[in-house]
Amino acid sequence: MSKVLVVDDSLSVRKVVERALAGRQIDVVCAASGSEALERLERDPPDIVVCDVVMPDRDGYEICEFIKRHPRLSHTPVLLMSGIVNDEVRERAARAQSAGILAKPFAADDLMRHLDSLLAQAPARPSPVRESPAVAEAPATQGNTIPVPESAGAILAQFVAMDGVQWAVLADREGFVIESTANAGVDADVAAALSACLAESSDGLGRELGRGALQGAILEFEKGMVVIYGIATSGLLAVGIGEPSVLGKVRYYARRALPELARGM
């Protein structure tokens, strides 16, 4: 079974990758920091590394350079992820000898196209280095666990249980889905990404006009409404409404549910 190491300090990005690879013959291992990634690389080399460019301790370029200089890992392809992809990023990625750059936010299909291509070219993975019992028995890291409250799914389900509500999506400010309801005709990834774009521009408007951060927005369209709420500083809740008469009920329930969702972000 192929192994992919995902390195990103964003919990929701790691979850997106895990979901995209679910059901495939691929073992997904996650690291929440550059330092944790280096430890995992030494302990159990993967077939591919998918690594964010911007991280608080070691950036993606450093991780890529480390891999390319390593005597056992130098042939391991590294796919970098970046929220900004411009000439400078491409040049630094090329100097670090990355196998490519994936722009964030990304669709699952885009990720799979990159990985399928890299897996077809990847050499056989070296055997894991033997460890002492003390290291082997150390507690496993929880870096790939998403701290979404157990009730997040239940909260979203309460929204769609209301007559006139079509779907609900919980996302982070980068536009990645954390939790969503089974919805009719709506792509949760698209709803999350566009909500994040709207929230970012609305926050900018609030700053310029001296109104502070976005708390919520009600968008009226020809075929219904979308209500968006900011959750603390890191999350967003988007709810699709088909019947305007349910708006008051949605707003009332959202005010009660947002504090609980915020505790898990």
Image (cartoon, rainbow, N blue to C red):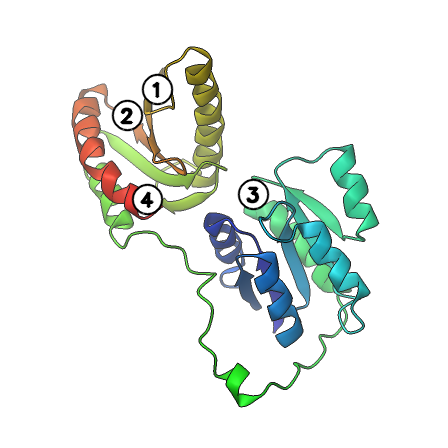
Identify which residue is drawn at 47% across, 42% down. Answer: 176
Query: Where's residue 106, x and y in %?
Result: 58, 42
Locate residue 255 relative to residue 20 in the image: left or right. Answer: left
Question: Gap in Å between the C-alphas at discs 1 and 3?
Answer: 25 Å
* Chain-order first, disc 4 or disc 2: 4
Horizontal and vertical percent position of residue 239: 31, 32
Residue that numbered label 3 is attached to: 107
User: Label 4 amino acid?
Assistant: Thr
- In the structure shown, which secondary structural element does the residue marked by tag 3 occupy? loop
Q: Which mark is residue 242?
A: 2
The residue located at (43%, 29%) in the rendering is 195
Q: Which of marks 4 and 2 is in front?
A: 4
Residue toward you, 72 or 254: 72
Regarding residue 225, the answer to whether it shows in the image is no
Sequence-first tag of 3 and 2: 3
Tell me, yes or no, whether the two marked residues, 3 and 4, touch with CB atoms within 8 Å.
no
212 over 147 or under it: above or below: above
Numbered badge on residue 223 = 1
Give the amino acid type for the residue marked by disc 3 in the picture.
Answer: Ala
Q: Answer left or right for 243 relative to 16.
A: left
Q: Which of marks 1 and 2 is nearer the N terminus?
A: 1
Disc 2 marks which amino acid?
Gly
User: Could you tell me if the residues under marks 1 and 2 are in contact, i.e. CB atoms within 8 Å?
Assistant: yes
Q: Does residue 174 appear to the left or right of 52 in the view shown?
A: left
Which numbered circle lies on residue 181?
A: 4
Q: Is 210 drawn above or below residue 84 in the view shown? A: above
The residue at 32%/37% (across/down) is 168
Q: Which of marks 4 and 1 is nearer the N terminus?
A: 4
